[in-house]
Image (cartoon, rainbow, N blue to C red):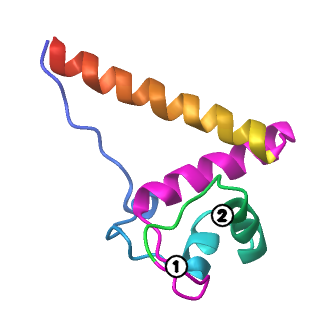
Amino acid sequence: MASHPIAIPAHLVELLDDAALDLQALAHGCHMTTEWVLTRVESGVLEPSSGRAATEWRFASTTLVRARRLADLEHAFDADPQLAAMAVDLMEEVAALRRQLLHLA
């Protein structure tokens, strides 16, 4: 069976460089406040890829995906941030295992 490309509307696509997002850009990208991001970084749920102080932090595009998932779970299910993080960890692990299975097939 031949695969067909999927058309994605341009307004749904974001091109990001790794480690290019600062604190404010990450917060804006996941529609949350900078305080929300600060709290998640302090609790270890989100990790900057570089920088020591909050003003120097830079985040990878994968962190934006993770932050969006966290925000969605917290909002949709009124989930505790730590439980939402555990769910996102499991989602990421399942995705990684699926990629491994594709390489084995």
Which amino acid type is shown beneath numbered disc 2?
Val
Q: Is residue 71 magenta?
A: yes
**Closer-to-camera residue (76/90):** 90
- Circles 1 and 2, Cβ within 8 Å, touching? The answer is yes
Across and down, in percent, residue 82 comes to: 76, 42
The quadrant holding residue 67 is bottom right
Which residue in the protein does label 2 denote?
Answer: 41
Picture layout, residue 27 above or below residue 1: below
- Total labels: the figure holds 2
Q: CA distance from mark 1 to mark 2?
A: 10 Å
Q: Where residue 74 sits: x, y (%)?
A: 78, 45
- Residue marked by disc 1: 57
The residue at 21%/37% (across/down) is 5
Residue 93: % across, % down: 46, 29
- Residue farthest toward the bottom in the current orientation of the protein: 55
User: Which span of residues is magenta-colored?
Assistant: 51-80
- Which amino acid type is shown beneath numbered disc 1? Trp
Mark 2: give few (<14), some (14-19) or many (20+) Cα within 10 Å.
Answer: some
In-image side of 42 versus 46 (left or right) = right
- Residue drawn at point x = 48 percent, y = 79 percent: 51
Q: Secondary structure at mark 2?
A: helix
